[in-house]
Amino acid sequence: MGNRGMEDLIPLVNKLQDAFSGIGQSCNLDLPQIAVVGGQSAGKSSVLENFVGRDFLPRGSGIVTRRPLVLQLISANAEWAEFLHCKGKKFTDFDEVRQEIEAETDRITGANKGISPVPINLRVYSPHVLNLTLIDLPGITKVPVGDQPVDIEQQIRDMIMQFICRESCLILAVTPANSDLANSDALKLAKDVDPQGQRTIGVITKLDLMDEGTDAREVLENKLLPLRRGYIGVVNRSQKDIDGKKDIKMAMAAERKFFLTHPAYRHMAEKMGTPCLQKVLNQQLTNHIRDTLPAFRSKLQTQLLSLDKEAEEYRGYRPDDPGRKTKQLLQMVQQFSVDFEKRIEGSGDQVDTVELSGGAKINRIFHERFPFELVKMECDDKEMRREISYAIKNIHGIRTGLFTPDMAFEAIVKKQIVKIKEPCIKCVDMVIQELINTVRQCTNKLDCFPRLREETERIVTSHIRDRESRAKDQVLLLIDVQLSYINTNHEDFIGFTWYPRNVVPQVIRKGWLTINNISIIKGGAKEYWFVLTAESLSWFKDDEEKEKKYMLPLDNLKVRDVEKGFMSSKHAFAIFNTEQRNVYKDNRFLELACDTQDEVDSWRASLLRAGVYPERSSNDNFSMDPQLERKVETIRNLVDSYMAIVNKCIRDLMPKTIMHLMISNVKDFINAELLAQLYSAGDQGALMDESQEQVQRRDEVLRTHQSLKEALAIIGDISTTTISTPMPPPNMSYTRGQRPSPGGGRGAPPPPNRPGPLGPFNNSADSPQVPSRPNRPRAYVLLYGSVGQSMIVCTKSKGLIHTWITN
């Protein structure tokens, strides 16, 4: 054995592995183990069979190992095998073991060469084995065969990576000697997850099949592609030997003879072969378990602490106790009430950073969605003016009115107020939906009692629907109240007496326009920054408004359409003087252009507000006389002013109404009446019937908790102070292929059997001495190691520390 006093470590891990396999994936612990990785036909199965001394693994062409095989070798006086999925059944015939592996593989993966990451646990007891735990993984393949999926290579790689990426896993990289080591898939995968090579052990198979005149001496001497743990060569049985049922003992004797007689390997024969590999793996796994034991114990303790509270609740649990059911019903309803209030009112504890809670979403509806819906209901400006014009004409009838009629204003305002009903009802619907979603989220904690969750959702949702009709009636009442009386004395209303002196702002509009009818000699069409006020239209060189080009008074101006030119991409309109005077310099009209027709219409509307009316058109449906347009503009501004008041009032009252009639009422109902409603719903005992998932969860937590306690108790009995064989030092490259002698020359590194890179010695008395000249004090090596192509040696002499760097 590699470690006296530590021989119980591997059986301990085997015991833990079985225990945690039995309780499923709830205890995600990385148990120390060895994963066997290699390509198809690399000889992985033969290596494992040599360990056992029996033929027990499936063989054939293509991919044979299609599920991970956790092989636990245990030294015992008798020989038999056991499967974890066939507890209590002993297999003494290893042909039956092979058949059981094939049957269990097909049970999960089918017979179509598919693969599965679900492992098969096999335990082999034998007097011919050392304690060892290995995982035989599917061989790396390149091309799918049969019914295998096209991504079979990636699937196998992903499965292998699940095992070897764990820091607690040693990697046994198997590579045949008759292939190029630089292209080894096993070594490439190992290097991806273990770049320092601290967990990788190389195995070279098929040494007897190399071409005549070639050998793998440099590989086995760890010179070609160095590994921290080195390489071990083995010679397996050939296919002819397997078909001929050649005994494994005879094969191992032939392997021993091969290494003793081969001129390239006989000097290292004691370090080669299956027995040596088995001893090295036993020693390395034992050391690895010892090294990872503190972190493993810490992880066990962490998981045990996380389950303590839940296990304490389940311990002594009696599902059919009426007193327990009543108490738990009260606790569940109270917790539901607290969760609902926290989600609505907000809470500082357990803040959700992924999505908005119910209260935050309702706040967004009140202050973002609802105002947006109100804005969407605003009428089109052109349609509004047409309606106002018709209202004025219909009120005057056959007569020509001299004053702006109040009735037209009131008729238009009431029509606009009625349109508010739709967004108000939509706001109530959105809040109701969020309340129902919040109830469902809060009942997620009642999953373990399906009937209780179902009844709770039904009762609370029914109450919300009952309050819905009342809330909508109250909201419609708010609209009716606004329709019942148009308050033109409101302090925020501009009123007829204020218009137009104060209602028209000093600046009505600003924006870019192109003047088309400037002479070609002066540069043709040019873009300017225009500013429209109630008295004038000015344009500037740019939007900084520092250099004014011209200011045009609005007196006697009108607007008319301009047909779009054949080669022009812009839409235009013209301003002209009704008294046939020049508008701008020598021009009788000013032709202005925009990029879109919408911009033209917008500018025409702004000019109309400033008192610049369109030219009368023969195909207009309503009069365009200046007096009527002035009345239309007056009522248009009055309607805007009054609707701003109404919208402000509705935006303020809607959240208050919904909060009072819906949200606060639902909270009070849950606090005061939900429990009584549940009691009146039927049998309380049936309400508290557990789901099957909850029963399984309770059993799983208790079993996991017990297994963790047992595991910690077992580990607590193991002493981790035993000195183990240290990891080999990093492999060093020497110039011109020369290795220094053990004595070394001046500045030579210490012997290679010292501890790892930059590893400290236990005491200076055991440290190798740096060669010294006569009368020079003794120096002791404290640290040494390699960085790239350089060696670093740290020494101590007479209390001073010196650092040596050699190439």
Image (tube, grey):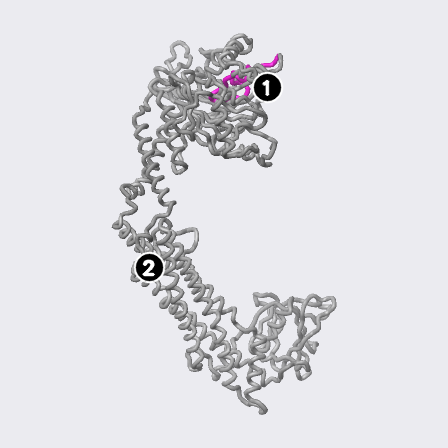
Q: Is residue 113 above or below residue 527?
A: above
- Secondary structure at numbered mark 1: loop
Residue 535 quadrant: bottom right
Q: Amino acid at mark 1?
A: Asn
**Side of 59 relative to 294 (left or right):** right
Residue 360 quadrant: bottom left
Q: CA distance from mark 2 to mark 1?
A: 78 Å
612 vs 597, nearest the viewer: 597
Residue 417 in picture, x, y percent from top left:
48, 76
237 vs 590, nearest the viewer: 237
Main secondary structure of the magenta stretch = loop
Report crowding for label 2: few under 14, some 14 to 19, many 20 or more residues within 10 A (C-alpha). Answer: few
* Residue located at (37% from left, 54% from top): 453
Residue 285 quadrant: top left
Comparing marks 2 and 1, which lies closer to the viewer? Answer: 2
Q: Amino acid at mark 2?
A: Ala
Q: Is residue 727 above or below residue 563?
A: above
Confirm or deny contact between disc 2 and disc 1 (CB under 8 A).
Answer: no
Q: Quadrant of the N terminus?
A: top left
| Range drawn in magenta | 213-233
Is residue 279 visible in this depiction of the protein?
yes
Residue 286 in picture, x, y percent from top left:
39, 22
Task: Name the disc covering residue 681, or none.
Answer: 2
626 vs 660, nearest the viewer: 660
Residue at the extreme left of the image, as rendered: 323
Residue at the extreme bottom of the image, as rendered: 399
Does the segment drawn in magenta span residue 229?
A: yes
Task: Name the disc covering residue 178, or none.
Answer: 1
Does the segment drawn in magenta span residue 201?
A: no
46 vs 108, nearest the viewer: 108
Is residue 196 visible in this depiction of the protein?
no
